[in-house]
Image (cartoon, grey):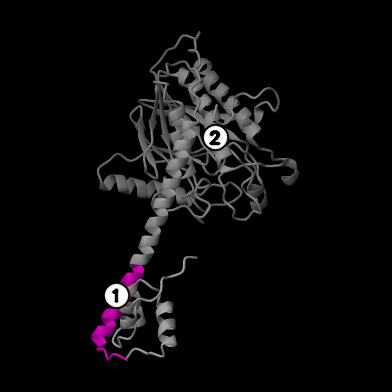
Amino acid sequence: MKKKPNWTPQELTLLQTGTLSDARVAELTGRSKAAIRGRRQRMNFRPAVVETTVGQDITRHQNDYWRGQYDLLRRKYEAVLKDGSAAQQLIELASSLAPQSYQPAPAIETVRQKAGKEQSAVLMLTDTHVGADIKPEQTLGFGGYNFNVFLRRLKFLEQGVESIITDHVSTDVPELIIAMGGDMLHGNLNHSVEAAQVHTLFEQYYGAGHALAQFLRRVARLAPAVRVYTAVGNHTRWGTQKKMPTDNRYSNLDMFLYAYLKALTSDIPNIVWNLDKQPFALFDVQGHRFHLSHGDHLRGGDKALGVPNHAVGRMVSSTTQLCGKFGTPAPHYYLTGHLHRSIVLPHARGSVIVNGGFPGLDGFGLMSGFTPADPTQTLFFVHPTYGKTATFDIQLKFAPDSGPAPYEIPACGQ
């Protein structure tokens, strides 16, 4: 620690001024109050007691209070600047490592005759939890999930989407909307566990980025236009945050991943990314309004069925009132994830659609007594008149558990 310089004659004069308190001398000299107090004690000097009025005392206490509030806000501001700087460096580092060798997949040649009015396809892609490591020996032999399982399930999802769009529907599909609803990474939260972060954040970010980028490149050939909308999850918040923040919610590992994916797919002209700082994404499909969120704000409900009925009702009511107040159309369809189970609940204008997850049974669900739900992702179609029509729950549990790696994850720096 650097030693403070010797006391100057001017400082010694201030020390012997009886009308100046220790705090005031500290302000004038830049030294600590403890140093001022210690020096005065060694000099056998005590400042005179200055008589003050009640009004002066009140003013002094008010000044002390607001000075404390200023210091608190200043510390918070500096913390935000530090987090933002680290986040920007992370994005720049990962983007600089993005390979330019990916090639778009060849176009799909359809053999079926299409008929009827065209419909848009909507794929809900949420809760992949890349970085989670669920061991069968810790889940009664029923659970099992890791990065290799994720890759195989993602490939199975890709093949399922291609099969449904090309072979299972009889209409033209002008666009594919991908609703990425958060918890794409497992994060590094340490609550209720001894060691949650099995894989480093960079490994999660880098591995998920390359795998999902290749997935997006391949499904992009299924429709002339691909629109991607995003919301961040709660598992990908910073490890220092005990719960999701209400402000700056977008500053989250999911958002960094989305920015990385946008960079990795920037050469695919029909993919359009919609990234913003909103807690929810609002968009239209075939004239119908959609509301996308992760779903961690839907709390409560029974553990057996895992349906937060009251929270869903509040979301629909408050959102409808908010839209009515400002003269915008209320959503027809609410898309969420978080609950890791497929649920559809009707409301007056449409329905609330909850997506499944990639991992399946885990230790948290087992010890919480949740009924086990298979890993699934939801794909459905939207008609300009009828709204949501054909719906497919793609069962990821049927993904093969062996064979060559379905996606290439390049070594860092390639």
Q: x, y percentage for residue 247?
A: 38, 52
Q: Can residue 178 be seen?
A: no
Per the image, the residue denoted by label 2 is 206
In the picture, the disc for residue 63 is 1
- Image quadrant in which you'd find residue 172: top left
Residue at image location 50% in from the left, 17% down from the top: 103
Q: In the image shown, does 361 or 327 lie closer to the viewer?
A: 361
Residue at image location 42% in from the left, 55% down from the top: 79
Compared to residue 61, the image places residue 220 above or below, namely above
Q: x, y percentage for residue 234?
A: 50, 47
Q: In the image shown, does 104 or 347 lie closer to the viewer?
A: 104
- Start-end of magenta stretch: 49-69
Q: Is residue 319 left or right of residue 206?
A: left
Q: In the image shown, does 369 or 317 lie closer to the viewer?
A: 369
Quick check: marks 1 and 2 in contact, CB under 8 Å? no
- Image quadrant in which you'd find residue 76: bottom left
In the picture, the disc for residue 208 is none
The secondary element bearing badge 2 is classed as helix
Residue at image location 39% in from the left, 20% down from the top: 269
Mark 1 or 2, nearer chain start: 1
Q: Can residue 414 be seen?
A: yes
Crowd rating for badge 1 (residues with CA inside 10 Å; few <14, some 14–19, many 20+) = few
Which amino acid lies under the numbered mark 2 shown in the image of this protein?
Tyr
The question of residue 330 being in magenta is answered with no
The secondary element bearing badge 1 is classed as helix
